[in-house]
Image (cartoon, rainbow, N blue to C red):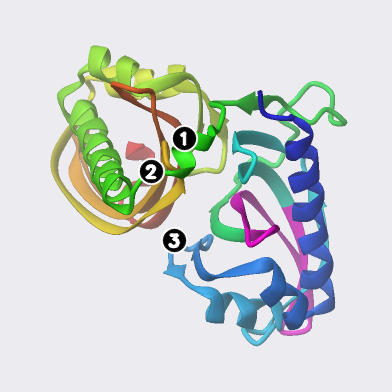
Amino acid sequence: MIDQNIATIVWQRELATHGYMLAGDVAAARADTAADLLHINVEGVCHGLDLFLEMVAAENGVRHLGVDAGPGEAIVLSPDAVLITYPLTAHLAVAGKAMTATEHASILWMRRAGDWQTVFIHATPLVDAAPRFADPAANGRLATVLAFTEDDRAISDAVIAERKAQAFACEQAAVESLRRHDLAAAMAAFHPDCIFVEFDGSRCGRDTWLALVGDRQRTLDATQIDLIDVIAVAPYAMLVVYTMTSSGDYAGAPFHLDEALSALWINQGTTWQCVFAQVTLRQTIQREAM
C-alpha cells in the first residue's frame, strides 16, 4: 500500500514553489523543475522550461506579489509520482499596477534521481473563485489510484512505448464517444472518481462528463487532434497532452473551439480508465456552446 504521507510531502513541495515565484528565484525554480517540463498556461499555450523560468524572473512584465492556494487534491500514482490539483489566486504587479488573477492549476510531481521535480503544469482560468468545499480548511480528498510494484519497474521501453500509444488511442476514443453520444463507452472509460477540470476552471466529476456526452443538443462534426506528448508517469499511468480543434452546433447555434487538453489514463490490466482530465480554451467563437 502506498504511504499517503507522500501526498502531504508533495503538497508542501508545491506550496514551496510559490516562494521562488515571489522571490523571482530562477536558480531555485530550475532545481525544482524538470528539464523536459511541459507547461500549458492560462492562454492554452504549451511551452517548456525556458519560458517557465522567464515567467519566474518576471521577464514577461508580470511580477508575483502573493499566492493564495485553495484546498488541494492529490492523485497518488506511485511512491514516485503525484498529481496535485487546486485553485489559486495570484496577486500580481502588471506594468506597475496591482491586479489579481484566479486559475485552477494541476501539477505533476515525479521523483527523479532521489528528489521531487515538477514535470507538467496545466493552468486554466478560474471564473468562480468561491471555495469548492464546505470547510475552506479542508484539503479535499486524497485518491490513491494504484500501488506501484517492483515488477512494474522492470517493464521494458518497448512496453512503455506501446502503452503510450494505447493511452493516446483511448483519449481519441473518448472524444469519439462524445461525438456519438455513447454513454456506455464513456462510463467504461472514465474512473468513477475521475477529476475533470472544465474550461472555466471548475472541478467536476464523471457525472458532469456523462451529462455532456448525453446532451443531444450538441452536434460535434469535425475534430482535429494534435498530440504534444504522452508522459509516462508510471509504467501503468500515461498522461496524454494534446490540442484539439472542433466544430459543430449547440441547439442550432454553430461553434468552433480550440483547446489544450491533458488526460491521465491508468492501465487496469486489461482495460484503461481516465482518472483526470483538464481543458484550457485557446480560442473560441461561441463559448456558450460549451
Label whose residue precedes the other's in the sequence (3 or 1) = 3
**Which element type, helix, strand or loop, lies under badge 3?**
loop
Three-letter code, disc 1? Asp
- Residue at left offset 48%, top offset 43%: 153
Residue 122 vertical placement versus 250 (above, below): below
The percent position of residue 50, horizontal first and vertical second, equals: 54, 81
- Density class for disc 3 (Cα within 10 Å; few <14, some 14-19, many ≥20) is many
The percent position of residue 251, horizontal first and vertical second, equals: 23, 28
Say which mark, if any, is on residue 155.
2
- Density class for disc 1 (Cα within 10 Å; few <14, some 14-19, many ≥20) is few
Numbered range of the magenta stretch: 89-117
Three-letter code, disc 3? Gly
Say which mark, if any, is on residue 44.
3
Name the outermost residue toward the right. 137
Q: Judge from the rendering whether residue 128 lies leftward or rightward of residue 262; answer left or right.
A: right
Compute the Cα span from label 3 to label 1.
37 Å
- Residue at left offset 55%, top offset 60%: 119
Name the outermost residue toward the top. 184
* Image quarter hosting the C terminus: top left
For the residues bearing labels 2 and 1, Cβ distance under 8 angstroms: yes
- Of badges 3 and 1, the one in the foreground is 1
- Residue at left offset 62%, top offset 34%: 76
Residue 286 belongs to the span the image colors magenta = no
Compute the Cα span from label 2 to label 1.
7 Å
**Which element type, helix, strand or loop, lies under badge 2?**
loop
The percent position of residue 196, horizontal first and vertical second, equals: 49, 33
Compute the Cα span from label 2 to label 3.
34 Å
Query: Can residue 71 be spotted in the picture?
Result: no
Determine which quarter of the picture holds residue 123. Answer: bottom right
Say which mark, if any, is on residue 138.
none
- Look at the magenta stretch and give its main secondary structure: strand
Residue that mark 1 sits on:
151
